[in-house]
Amino acid sequence: VQLQASGGGLVQAGGSLRLSCAASGRTFSTMGWFRQAPGKEREFVSAINWSGSTLYADSVKGRFTTSRDNAKSTVSLQMNSLKPEDTAVYYCAGRYSILAVSTPGGYDYWGQGTQVTVSS
């Protein structure tokens, strides 16, 4: 089982980035995105289940959009109006249950992370 995240980079505040995560070896009912900034705990960003139901952290609502392609076993995170406080390593995670949750412990597999840096 492998989750491969990509698409991170350096962007100015107000800009956009699109992250992608490809799952191989297993189908997950729910895919989530988390992030971790230096010195901080890993925090929930978004989740989407097989039927397309989504869940977002308050801090990203209206700016970030998650989507998935079940046929390709991929999930994406479109990040708009980026702020310096969005700077973190972003991780995708897979969960067998179709119930989307925001707690890291609720996910069964994790990708390796991709760095997002937003300059002011």
Image: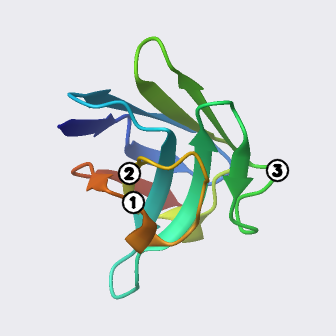
Please tell me whether mark 2 or mark 3 is closer to you in this view.
2
Residue 119 placement (x, y as % from top left): 50, 60
**Residue type at tag 1:** Tyr
Q: Say left or right for 108 vs 85.
A: left
**Residue type at tag 2:** Ala
Q: In the displayed image of the protein, which residue is found farthest to the right?
A: 62
Q: Earlier in the sequence, mark 2 or mark 3?
A: 3
Distance Cα–Cα, label 2 vs label 3: 22 Å
Q: Say left or right for 14 vs 70.
A: right
Question: Which residue lies under the disc numbered 2?
Answer: 93
What element does badge 1 sit on? loop
Residue 78 placement (x, y as % from top left): 61, 36
Name the one closer to the observer, 86 or 31: 31
What element does badge 3 sit on? loop
Name the one closer to the observer, 5 or 74: 74
Q: Quadrant of residue 49?
A: top right
Instruction: Say which mark, if any, is on residue 62.
Output: 3
Question: Which residue lies under the disc numbered 1?
Answer: 107
Residue 74 placement (x, y as % from top left): 43, 25
Q: Label 2 neighbourhood size at 10 Å, few (<14), some (14-19), many (20+)? A: many
Please tell me whether mark 3 or mark 1 is closer to you in this view.
1
**Residue type at tag 3:** Gly
